[in-house]
Amino acid sequence: MKNNLILYSMQISMLKQLLTHKLISEKEYKTVKSKLMKDYHIISDITG
């Protein structure tokens, strides 16, 4: 479980960089983030 959280965090970080550099849209960011949360069984996002 701890390993999953680390992998999830790394992927979210990379995803956020894509958004920051405008390589993906806000809609794409939210779609991928939602899928990652589902895949990694993350039920809450305190970062917003």
Image (tube, rainbow, N blue to C red):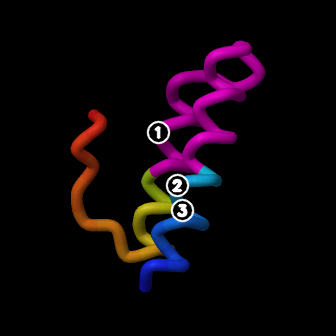
Seen in the image, is 22 located left or right of residue 27?
right
Q: Nearer the viewer, mark 3 or mark 1?
A: 3
Indicate the amino acid at tag 2.
Ser
Mark closest to the chain's N terminus, 3 or 1? 3
How would you rate the neighbour count of disc 3 (Cα within 10 Å): few for under 14, some for 14-19, many for 20 or more? some
Residue in the foreground of this view, choosing between 6 and 39: 6
Seen in the image, is 37 located left or right of residue 47?
right
Gap between marks 1 and 2 measured at Cα: 15 Å
User: Residue 48 at what x, y percent from top left?
Assistant: 27, 34
- On whether residue 15 falls in the magenta region, the answer is yes
Seen in the image, is 34 located left or right of residue 46?
right
Q: Residue furthest bottom?
A: 1
Residue under pointer 3: 8
Indicate the amino acid at tag 3.
Tyr
Query: Residue 1 bears which disc, if any?
Result: none
Residue under pointer 1: 30
Residue at image position (60%, 66%) is: 7
Mark closest to the chain's N terminus, 1 or 2? 2
Residue at image position (37%, 76%) is: 41
